[in-house]
């Protein structure tokens, strides 16, 4: 099992505390959405799980192993960034292969995995292009493909839809839900968009002001908000 456990995780930047004793247990295969207003610490929490940011206090466990002191590539997670963070000088295939080359995966295996992921995401015809020759939606797929080829225990997605136009955002949202159904990996998805949270999550983690306000299924969060903040943020009936 590859459950993710956060134990009283806190984060400060210098003297400024941005997360205060966040604890939760994410079960393998869940689609977890961190939902909250801008600045509440969602990205910082995700980056700490990914290993891109140090934990100030507390512990992070993945699959029964403490990982908060491990480098990012030893944690078994893959991050998809809001701005996609593709290498502009590399082709799509090279962008998707790069992480696997770094960990010494044999070349035929890399080719097979990239081809499989490209087929799943319907980007096979784009493999020899450079990022500048792609639309926003296509870049988004490549960024997801780059995560898929690593076969991670968890996908960490930081506002992955926010740079897409409205129509494409809805379509990509549905595709992400299908992808989750198909590959059954854990997804942790950060957003400030209530609709995305309500439609994607198996459980929503509502965050505000350095803390978790409530954890629950979309129905629980909507129909039984635990705090006034949750009620107003998700627009529950008064
Ligand atoms: P969110 O993703 O919910 O919008 P962030 O996790 O990006 O929030 O930021 C939480 C808080 O931490 C904000 O007040 C932000 O300004 C601060 N912060 C984030 N990264 C840094 C950093 N590298 N140095 C100092 N402050 C930071
Ligand atoms: Mg953020």
Image (cartoon, helix red, strand yellow):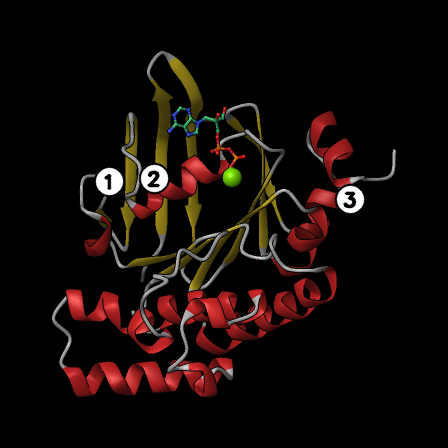
| Residue 72 horizontal/vertical position (percent) | 24, 50
Q: For mark 3, give the secondary structure.
A: helix
- The mark tally for this picture is 3
Q: CA distance from mark 3 to mark 2?
A: 31 Å
Q: Is residue 117 above or below residue 186?
A: below
Cα distance, mark 2 to mark 1?
8 Å
Left or right: 128 with respect to 165?
A: left
Q: Residue at x 16, y 83 (%)?
A: 107
Q: Which residue is mark 2?
A: 48
Mark sitting earlier along the chain (3/1): 1
Q: Nearer the viewer, mark 3 or mark 2?
A: 2
Q: Nearer the viewer, mark 3 or mark 1?
A: 1
What residue is disc 3 on?
223
Disc 1 CB within 8 Å of nearest ligand 1 atom: no
Q: Is residue 227 above or below residue 27?
A: above
Q: Nearer the viewer, residue 1 or 19?
A: 19
Q: For the N terminus, give its image quadrant.
A: bottom left
Q: Residue 98 location in percent, x, y? A: 24, 68
Mark with earlier residue (3, 2): 2
Residue at point 51%, 27% (across, down): 211
Tag 3: Cα neighbours inside 10 Å, few (<14), some, or many (≥20)?
some
- Position of the C terminus by quadrant: top right
Q: Badge 1, how many Cα within 10 Å: few under 14, some, many 20+?
A: many
Whichever of labels 2 and 1 marks the residue nearer the N terminus, that label is: 2
Look at mark 1 in the image and give the residue it sits on. Answer: 68
C-beta proximity under 8 Å, tags 2 and 1? yes
């Amino acid at each position: 099992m590859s459950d993710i456990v956060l134990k009283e995780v806190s984060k400060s930047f210098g003297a400024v505390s941005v997360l205060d004793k966040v604890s939760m247990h994410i079960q393998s295969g869940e689609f977890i959405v961190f939902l909250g207003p801008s600045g509440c610490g969602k990205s910082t929490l995700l980056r700490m799980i990914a290993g891109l940011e140090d934990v100030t206090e507390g512990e992070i466990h993945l699959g029964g192993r403490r990982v908060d002191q491990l480098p990012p590539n030893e944690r078994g997670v893959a991050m998809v960034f809001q701005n996609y963070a593709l290498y502009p000088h590399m082709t799509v295939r090279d962008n998707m292969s790069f992480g696997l080359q770094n960990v010494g995966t044999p070349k035929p295996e890399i080719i097979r995995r990239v081809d499989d992921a490209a087929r799943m995401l319907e980007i096979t015809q784009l493999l020899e292009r450079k990022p500048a020759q792609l639309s926003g939606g296509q870049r988004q797929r490549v960024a997801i493909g780059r995560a898929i080829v690593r076969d991670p225990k968890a996908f960490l997605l930081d506002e992955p839809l926010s740079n897409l136009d409205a129509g494409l955002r809805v379509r990509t949202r549905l595709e992400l839900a299908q992808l989750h159904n198909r590959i059954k990996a854990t997804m942790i998805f950060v957003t400030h968009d209530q609709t995305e949270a309500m439609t994607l999550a198996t459980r929503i983690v509502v965050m505000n002001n350095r803390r978790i306000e409530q954890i629950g299924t979309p129905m629980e969060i909507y129909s039984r908000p635990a705090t006034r903040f949750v009620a107003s943020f998700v627009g529950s009936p008064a």
